């Protein structure tokens, strides 16, 4: 932090010469003895000159000097950390690792732990529109269910089919799941978060974890535990033959969190746990991407509070307050048509007003206030006015502007223009994972659009070049073969393989076993 400390507007530091100058002038102006030294005999000065209390005399001057120093430092823009661009939350990657060990069939939470996990995954996906998510299932082995994708329907199709019965080996290998998740994010080239949905974490996992991505653990179950219901209707028994009571291992999860720095929480009946996960994903991604971001976080505004407090101490017997109230009241009386916004304009710049509206979710109002074209474009983008956002971004020639134009053009369906915008962003800023990922999406959508247009241009009523008739096919075994081929084709079309069966076979092959 110390090595990164600097000022965004260092020229303001020249004004730091003003406070010591004020102190020097005040000290010389208050030296009454020096001014009378040539006019009064030295032995009479002590009797004739009465000096005010030095502490009371110097206090206002020192307070003014401190106030000006703080104000100048704040105006210079001290900073030591970067901040993420406004679109980072749209690209935060997430890998969900689901524990499918037998204890996840416990019914201490209704209808069961694994069924509740599926519902939570639906809720998590609902908070991640446009962002990419992958799913991993693990028990004694870890397997990829769905790679990183923004296709929510595809993810839900396979996660709805998850169950403990599809796993080839019992047990719990959390380290393997974390290693697989970490590999997915590293190959993707972007920072991300791994969410573990489990009822326990075995000892020694923290030593085996070498992931550079942040981990969030959501404990599933209750401390009191519950019996484990099997798919055949029976219950899982322990080694003694009694019904197994599977408890949520809260202590093991807490220990894992303290050893690895992971965020941990337990499942709730409402959506507070989902909102907690979504917030952690956004925060973790913002912190990771801000390290290499292009924007420094201006912390000069932190000094507004101390400056305002010291300015308040300068009020003497309320006269300054009364004068301020009189001036403000006179201004309003002299302008009957003044609006509340006019009063706000006295204290906040248009960009500051826009930021207040933006943080409050009023993006249309924020766009009307922002003078900065980039922030105005961001507000218009959030408001769904994508063409206006493109126009705002277009006034700035920088990589972030071209990247944001590409995002807005994707929403407008202008895939060819989006490809060009991402290309210009990457030309100005090479090896930009977010832009490269969105460029690939835009190119795929553009190709799909071209293929669809080509299909529509084909004439379905186009006549064949030639027609030939085979009279021999009307009799004998040839005709029977044709019927048999049609029946076989219809039978093949009617074969349906459920996602659960497909995953069970895939996992068994990956585990090197044959599953009946």
Image: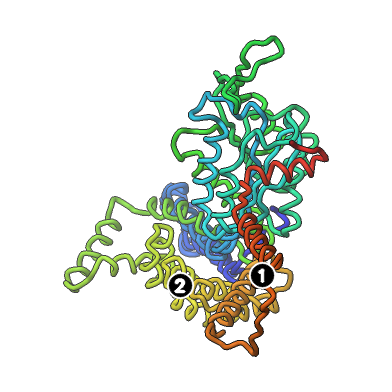
Residue count near mark 1 (Cα–Cα under 10 Å), binned few <14, some 14–19, many ≥20: few
The residue depicted at 65 percent of the width and 80 percent of the height is: 424
Residue 319, numbered circle: none
The coloring applied to the image is rainbow
| Up-down relation of residue 355 to residue 389 (above or below) | above
The quadrant in which the C terminus is found is: top right
Query: In the rendering, at what x and y percent does residue 356 appear?
Result: 40, 61
Q: Are marks 2 and 1 in contact (CB under 8 Å)?
A: no
Residue positioned most to the front: 476
Sequence order check, earlier mark of 2 and 1: 2
Give me the C-alpha separation between circle 2 and circle 1.
76 Å
Query: In the rendering, at what x and y percent does residue 468 appear?
Result: 66, 84
| Quarter-of-image position of residue 210 | top right
Can residue 202 be seen in this snapshot? yes
The residue depicted at 76 percent of the width and 57 percent of the height is: 187
The residue depicted at 79 percent of the width and 44 percent of the height is: 510
Query: In the rendering, at what x and y percent does residue 93 appear?
Result: 63, 54
- Where does label 2 land, which residue? 376
- Where does label 1 land, which residue? 475
Query: In the rendering, at what x and y percent does residue 159 appear?
Result: 59, 45
| Up-down relation of residue 222 to residue 118 (above or below) | above
Residue positioned most to the bottom: 465
Residue positioned most to the right: 512
| Up-down relation of residue 119 to residue 292 (above or below) | above
The residue depicted at 49 percent of the width and 33 percent of the height is: 268
Closest to the observer: 283 or 343? 283
Can residue 24 be seen in this snapshot? no
């Amino acid at each position: 932090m110390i090595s990164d400390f600097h000022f965004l507007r260092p020229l303001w530091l020249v004004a730091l010469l003003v406070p010591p100058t004020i102190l020097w002038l005040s000290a010389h102006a208050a030296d009454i003895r020096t001014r009378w030294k040539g006019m009064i005999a030295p032995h009479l000065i002590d009797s004739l000159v009465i000096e005010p209390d030095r502490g009371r005399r110097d206090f206002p001057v020192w307070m003014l000097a401190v106030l000006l120093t703080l104000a100048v430092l704040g105006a210079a823009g001290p900073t030591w950390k970067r901040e993420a661009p406004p679109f980072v939350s749209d690209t935060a990657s997430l890998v969900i690792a689901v524990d499918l060990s037998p204890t996840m069939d416990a019914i201490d939470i209704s209808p069961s732990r694994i069924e509740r996990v599926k519902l939570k995954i639906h809720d998590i996906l609902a908070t991640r529109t446009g962002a990419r998510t992958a799913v991993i299932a693990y028990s004694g082995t870890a397997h990829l269910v769905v790679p990183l994708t923004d296709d929510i329907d595809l993810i839900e199709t396979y996660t709805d089919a998850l169950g403990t019965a599809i796993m080839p080996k019992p047990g719990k290998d959390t380290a393997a799941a974390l290693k697989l998740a970490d590999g997915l994010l590293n190959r993707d080239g972007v920072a991300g978060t791994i969410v573990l949905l489990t009822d326990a974490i075995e000892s020694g996992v923290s030593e085996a974890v070498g992931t550079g991505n942040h981990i969030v653990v959501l404990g599933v179950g209750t401390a009191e535990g519950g019996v484990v219901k099997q798919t055949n209707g029976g219950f899982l028994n322990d080694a003694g033959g009694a019904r197994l009571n599977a408890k949520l291992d809260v202590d093991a999860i807490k220990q894992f969190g303290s050893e690895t720095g992971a965020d941990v929480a337990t499942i709730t009946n409402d959506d507070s746990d989902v909102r907690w996960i979504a917030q952690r994903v956004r925060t973790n991604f913002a912190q990771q991407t801000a390290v290499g971001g292009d924007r420094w976080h201006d912390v000069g505004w932190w000094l507004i509070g101390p400056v305002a407090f010291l300015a308040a101490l300068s009020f003497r017997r309320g006269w300054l307050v009364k004068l301020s109230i009189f001036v403000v009241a006179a201004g309003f009386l002299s302008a009957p048509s003044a609006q509340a916004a006019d009063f706000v304009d006295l204290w906040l710049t248009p960009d500051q007003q826009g930021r207040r509206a933006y943080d409050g979710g009023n993006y249309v109002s924020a766009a009307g206030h922002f003078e900065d074209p980039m922030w105005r474009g961001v507000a218009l983008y959030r408001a769904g006015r994508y063409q206006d956002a493109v126009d705002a971004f277009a006034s700035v020639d920088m990589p972030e502007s071209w990247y944001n134009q590409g995002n807005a053009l994707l929403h407008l369906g202008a895939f060819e223009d989006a490809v060009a915008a991402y290309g210009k962003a990457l030309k100005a800023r090479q090896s930009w994972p977010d832009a490269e990922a969105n460029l690939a999406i835009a190119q795929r959508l553009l190709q799909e659009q071209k293929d669809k247009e080509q299909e529509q241009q084909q004439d379905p009523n186009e006549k064949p070049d030639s027609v030939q008739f085979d009279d021999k096919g009307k009799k004998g075994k040839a005709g029977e073969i044709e019927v048999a081929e049609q029946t076989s084709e219809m039978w093949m079309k009617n074969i349906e393989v459920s996602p659960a069966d497909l995953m069970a076979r895939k996992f068994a092959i990956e585990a090197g076993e044959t599953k009946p």
